[in-house]
Image: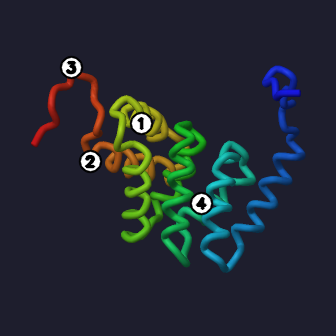
Amino acid sequence: MGFSPRSRQNPPMSNEARRAAVAALAALAGSPDYRDRADAGHGLAGFAEMPEARPTLRELVLDAGNTFVTRVTAGALLRRRDAAGFETVASAFADADDNHADWIHTAVLDVFILSSRERDAAVRECTALTQDPDEQVRRGADKLIASLTKFNTVLRPAEDGPPAT
């Protein structure tokens, strides 16, 4: 008997199960081990649209103990390529010290250095966040836009020509 992708359909995860997953990952985020916190940030990023996940995600992006946690969590949030991920990173970026800001920028490079189309779509998402009612999100969105537009991507549409030197 072989596996048939049509033989199984995953029902949507219930809100109760999602809240339980967020609670478990939030507990892991409190670990003294930076690897646990990085794993928590990576996993919790999948729940960034849930309001109960955002405070823990913000804390992990600004992790006081290890900037590896910053890079992993910010990268996972940015890889969502959606408003929830960008808003969470922007909220943290607004208050980031220079060291954390450097690692958030490194996460931006990790995620968006390859494709100008993906980077430009991220700039559009962040531009929308500059109109957010939360002043902190607006400030962070401006910082994200600056970070996203600091570099040339590896892949660009042919009509753009070679990068400026």
**Tag 3 or tag 4, which sits nearer the N-term?**
4
Instruction: Tell me where residue 163 appears, x and y as whole percent.
Output: 16, 36
Residue type at numbered disc 3: Glu
Q: Secondary structure at mark 1?
A: helix
Report the residue that reaches farthest toward the left. 165
**Marks 3/2: CA–CA distance:** 20 Å
Quarter holding residue 14? top right
Instruction: Tell me where residue 120 appears, x and y as whole percent.
Output: 37, 32
**Tag 1 or tag 4, which sits nearer the N-term?**
4
Query: Which mark is on residue 159?
Result: 3
**Tag 2 or tag 4, which sits nearer the N-term?**
4
Cβ–Cβ under 8 Å for marks 3 and 2: no
Q: Secondary structure at mark 4?
A: helix
Residue type at numbered disc 1: Thr
Residue that badge 4 annotates: 58
**Tag 3 or tag 1, which sits nearer the N-term?**
1
Cβ–Cβ under 8 Å for marks 4 and 2: no
Residue that badge 1 annotates: 127
Q: Is residue 113 left or right of residue 31?
A: left
Cβ–Cβ under 8 Å for marks 4 and 1: no
**Marks 4/3: CA–CA distance:** 39 Å
- Number of residues whose C-alpha sits closer than 10 Å to that of mark 4, classed few (under 14), some (14–19) or many (20 or more): many
Residue that badge 2 annotates: 150
Which residue shows up at 16% across the image and 26% down it?
Answer: 161
**Marks 2/1: CA–CA distance:** 15 Å
Query: Which mark is on residue 69?
Result: none
Judging depth in this view, the residue of 136 and 66 nearest the camera is 66
Judging depth in this view, the residue of 74 and 142 nearest the camera is 74
Q: Nearer the viewer, mark 4 or mark 1?
A: 4
Instruction: Tell me where residue 130 appears, x and y as whole percent.
Output: 44, 41
**Marks 1/3: CA–CA distance:** 24 Å
Residue type at numbered disc 4: Arg
